[in-house]
Each structure stands twice: as C-alpha cells, then as structure tokens.
Image (cartoon, rainbow, N blue to C red):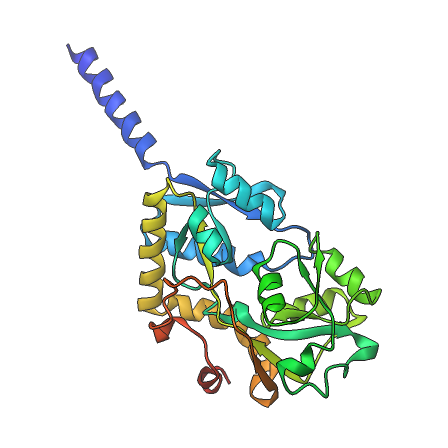
Amino acid sequence: MALRFCLFLLGLCWMAAVRAEPIVVHYPRAESVEDERGEYGHALLKLALEKAGNKYRVELSPTSMQQNRALVELQSGAGRIDVVSTMTSVEREKLLLPIRIPMSRGLIGWRLGLVKAERRNLLAAVRSVEDLRRYTTGQGHDWPDLTILRHNGIVVYPVTVYSSLFGMLKAERFDWAPRSVHEIWSEVRHHPDLAVDPNILLIYPTADYYFVNKKNAELAENLRQGLELALADGSFGQLFARHFGPAIRRAQLDKRVLIELNNPLLPPQTPLARKELWFNLSDLKRMR
C-alpha cells in the first residue's frame, strides 16, 4: 500500500510538472539578418504574455519567413506559426483573429520617403497628393500599403521580396519608397547609398496588430489581456519609447509637409475612439 501511495504521489507530481510547462508560441523569424522590423513585435509579444501570467513561452520559427508565407502558415493552423504581427485589413480580419490593440500606436501608417542618396531632395517641391502622383514608388506585393497607395492615385511597382526593394530603388526602377518612421533609419544604415527624404510626412490611418488562428481564441484573449495590462502599468509605453523614440525625434515630424491619404482597407472595428492607443504629433513634446 505504501508503495502504491508513493507511486500515486509521484504521478501527481509528474502531472503537475507537465501542466506547469509553458505553452510554446511560435513567432516568425525575420526575412533576413538586416531586417530589424520584427524586433519590437517580438519584444512586445513577450512582454504581453508575461503580463498575462507566463503561461506561454515565445520562440522564433526555425527559418526566416516572408510575411505572406507566415500568414498562410498561421491560417493553416498547423502549429508552425502561432502569432503574426502585421498591418490590418478587412480581408486579414476575415481570415484571422486580430487582437485590436495597435502595436506601434498607428505609427506603421506614418511614412517617410526612402530615396537614392544622390536624389535626396527629389520630393522637395511636393505639397499635396497631386504633386506626389508625379513620382513612382515601390512596395511589397502582398503589403496592404500597395492597395492604399494605388487607391490614392499613386503609381506603385510591386516588389516580391523585401530585400529587393532596396536594389530596385537603387536601380531607379521607381523613384522612392514610403517606409514607416520606425523602420526607415535602420534600412538607411544598412544601405548607405540610400537616404531619408527630409521634406514630407505621409500619413494614412492604419494599425498593426497581432493575429492568431481563428481557432486559438484562448491565446488571443490572453494576449489581449496582457497588452491591456501593459498599457495600464506603463510598460507598453516604455517599450514603445525605447524602441521608437530616437527614430521619432530624428524624423523631425513637425517640420515636414503633412500629406494625408485615405485607407480603403481600414476595418470598421478599428478602435479609433480609444485615443490612448494612437500616436499623434502632440506626443512629440513628451518624447523630447
């Protein structure tokens, strides 16, 4: 009897240890070693899941993934990818389950111009969308930005692979590429023959969210709760400022010509009424 009781206790201990093992959440690895776009998304994901109770452990996918492949993997539910961070659209919210808290506070829709260094002032005379339509641009073929720009009458050349964007720009296959305020500086650092246009700020309303498979409602809810907790205790804002503050200050956003575009892909459920979720120019004073 004593032996059976000991075995029973050992079994309970083993089951408790198994239950205590965190659930692995797979997040896509960046497309290349130069691609720093996913670093913030990875850091915020870990923060949110820690706030939700450390039930999960985040691991990067074994291999690099283009955005479209990561979304296909996520939709398949095969378990190779569990969370993707990307810009929202009506179509994506139909196929996947969004956590509607904008990761970059809408900054993904604040765009500066990436140009050849020798054409640094290419856009100096631009004052309106009509002026901008005289110039061609390039964007990823599966990025919502491509549709947004075309909807506003801008000629866009699709790029299949992220890294090709820079080679095509250098070869003058198009005139410029709108890149988000928090992405463009690392891209220029890796491509010193390119430069940041000092003249315009392009803005369209959009959000980048975490998305999960529609069948993974538990992970979505834990992630939502973790993000809300991080917002409430200030750790979300601190991470945002640490990652994006230098880029925002360097961009001198309030000294640029502001050009606003319409976004036909913006879902009606976008939480625009929650002002605390969105970055705006008045935030600049607090970041100086």
Asked if one can make out residue 96 in the rendered structure from this viewpoint, the answer is no
Q: Is residue 32 left or right of residue 206?
A: right
Q: Quadrant of residue 202?
A: bottom right
Seen at 46% across and 67% down, the residue is 239
**Above or below, 212 relative to 187:** above
Picture coordinates of residue 129, whole percent (x, y) = 63, 80
Q: Where residue 148 appears, x then y in whole percent?
A: 57, 66
Q: Is residue 30 above or below residue 13?
A: below
Tell me if residue 95 can be seen.
yes
The percent coordinates of residue 20 (x first, y second) are 32, 36
Quick one: which residue is furthest to the top in this view?
1
* Residue projecting furthest to the left: 1
What residue is rendered at 84% in x and 78% in y?
118
Name the quadrant containing residue 69: top right
**Viewport quadrant of the N terminus:** top left
The image position of residue 43, as x and y in percent, is: 49, 57
Decide which of 237, 255 is in the foreground and name it: 255
Q: Tell me: residue 130, above or below residue 114.
A: below
Residue at 21 percent of width and 18 percent of height: 8
